[in-house]
Image (cartoon, rainbow, N blue to C red):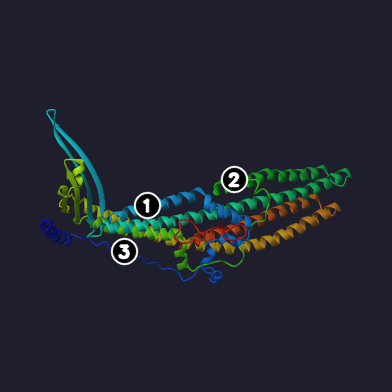
Amino acid sequence: MAEQVLRVFAAMASLALALHGCASVSTQPAPLAFDIPAGWSVPESSAMTGTSSLTQWWLRFDDPLLASLEAEAMQANTSVQSAEAALREARAQRDVSAGALLPSVGSSATAQRSTAGGKSLGSSFRIGLDASWELDIFGANRDALDASEAVVQASKASLGDVQVSIAAEVALSYLALRGAQAHLAIAEDNLATQLETLQITGWRVQAGLATSLDYEQARASTEQTRALLPALRTNAEQARHGLAVLTGKPPASLSTMLAAAGPIPRAPAGLAMSFPAETLRQRPDVRAAEYQVTAASARVAQADAARAPSFRIGGTLGLASLTLGALTSGSSVLSALLANVTMPVFEGGALLAQVRAQQAALEQAQLAYQAAVLTALKEVEDALVALQGDRERLAHLQLAAEAAGNASLLARQRYSGGLVDFQTVLDTQRTQLTTQESVANATIDLGADHVRLYKALGGGWRPDVDDATLAPAADASGKART
C-alpha cells in the first residue's frame, strides 16, 4: 500500500515539475556597480592608519571623562537597547523560518464514551504520534530562511548604526558642555577686566580727568557682559541634561559629576582614516542596505517558488483500544501514510503579481543601497573639507585673539595715563571678547569636525563580531572593562 502511494506521489510530482518549469521567471538580482574612488580628495587624508582605531575613536581625544560617558551610553542608552531588542526579534524570526525546513511531530491522546437512548455504546481510547514534512523541492522555505538571515544581518548593522550615532551624539554634547564652560570662563574673565576698567573710570571722573559719559559707557559695557553669564550657565546645564539622557540616566543625575569646568577636547592632528572602499564596508548603514538587497532578492525567489507545486508527506502511528488497559496490546497499533501534492491552477494572476511586487521591492532596495553609498562618500568628503577649513580658521583666530589681548592691555594702560580716550578702551575690550569667543567656537567646531568625520567613516562599532553589542567598552583609563 505504501509503495502505491509513493508511486502515485512520484507521478504527480513529475507532472507538477513539468508544468512549473514552463512558467518560471528570472529571480536574479540586477548587478550593483559603483565607481568608488581610490582615495579622498583632501590631500592630507592620504596618510591612512586603517579601521582598527575607529572602533573607539573617542579615546583619541585623551579625555577620560568622555571615554567613561561613551562606555555608559553604549550599555544603557535606550536607543541602543531598543536596537538590541530588534536584533533579538530578527534572530527569533530567523529561527521560525529555519523550523519550516524540518519535519514536525505532534502527539495526541483521546478518550471517548458514547451513549444512545440512555444506553452505553462503549468507550474508546487512542494515543498516537502525527508527523508531517513539507519537501522544499523548489526552495521556498530555504529562500525564506535566506531572507530572514539577511534581515538578521541588516538588523545587526542597524544596531551598529545606532551605536555610531549615539557615540557621535555623546561626543558632540560633551563638546557643547565644554564649549559653554569655556564661553562662561571667557565672559567672567572679561567681566573682571571691565569691572577694573569701570573702577579706574570712576576714579578719573572724580579727579576731573574723565566725563560721566565715559563712566556710563563703561558701566553699560560691563552690564552687557554680565548679562551673558545666565544664558551661558543655562547652556552648560542643558548640555549636562542631554549627556545624562544619552547615558540612560535622569537629566539632573550628572550635574555634580560634570559641574567642574574642563578644557575643550581636541583630537591629535593625525587622522585615523580608511580608504573609501574600506569605509563602505565599515559603515553600518551601508552594510544594512546591502543586506536588505540580499533579503529582497531572496523574497523574489520565495515568491516565485510559491507558484510551484508543494509536496508534503505525513504519517500517523498510534494505539487504539476499547479499554485503557488494552492500549499496550499489539493488536491495537494503527498506522497511516499520506503523500500530498498541491499546485495552484487559477488564482487570477495574484501569485505572479506578488513576484512582480517583490521584484519592484528589490529594485527599491538596490537604489537605497546606491543612495547609502553616495551619502557615505559625501559625508566623509564634507567632513574632511570642514576639518581642513576650520583648522585654518582656528589658526588665524588664535593670532587675532593674541593681538586683541595685547591691544586691550595697552589701551587700558594708556587710558590710565591719559594717553588715549575711553572709546579706544571700549573698542579693544569688545574686540578681545569677540575674538576669544571666536577661538572657543572654532575649537568646538574643530572637535565636532573630528566627531563627524569618524561618524562618517563608520567608527563606533565592531562590524565583524558576533555579539549583539560591542565588545567590553573602555573605561576612563582606556582599559577594557570586564
Q: Please tell me which of labels 2 and 3 falls first in the chain.
A: 3
- Residue 30: mark: 3
Q: CA distance from mark 1 to mark 3?
A: 30 Å
Q: Is residue 366 left or right of residue 391?
A: left
- Residue at 74%, 51% (x, y): give it: 189
| Residue 410: quarter of image | bottom right
Q: Residues within 10 Å of mark 2 (few under 14, many from 20)?
A: many
Q: CA distance from mark 2 to mark 3?
A: 48 Å
Per the image, the residue denoted by label 1 is 92
| Residue 358: quarter of image | bottom left
Q: Please tell me which of labels 1 and 3 falls first in the chain.
A: 3
The number of discs equals: 3
253 shown above or below 16 = above
Amino acid on which the number 1 mark rests in the picture: Ala
Task: Give residue 108's position: percent from left, percent from top.
Answer: 24, 45
Q: Residues within 10 Å of mark 3 (few under 14, many from 20)?
A: few
Task: Give residue 186's position: percent from left, percent from top.
Answer: 71, 52
| Residue 62: quarter of image | bottom right
Per the image, the residue denoted by label 2 is 241
- Residue 361 visible to an observer of this rendering: yes
Q: Please tell me which of labels 2 and 1 falls first in the chain.
A: 1
Circle 2: element type: helix
**Residue most extreme to the right:** 207
- Residue 362 visible to an observer of this rendering: no
Q: Is residue 428 left or right of residue 179?
A: right
- Residue at 48%, 56% (x, y): give it: 469
Circle 1: element type: helix
Task: Give residue 482's position: percent from left, percent from top.
Answer: 55, 57
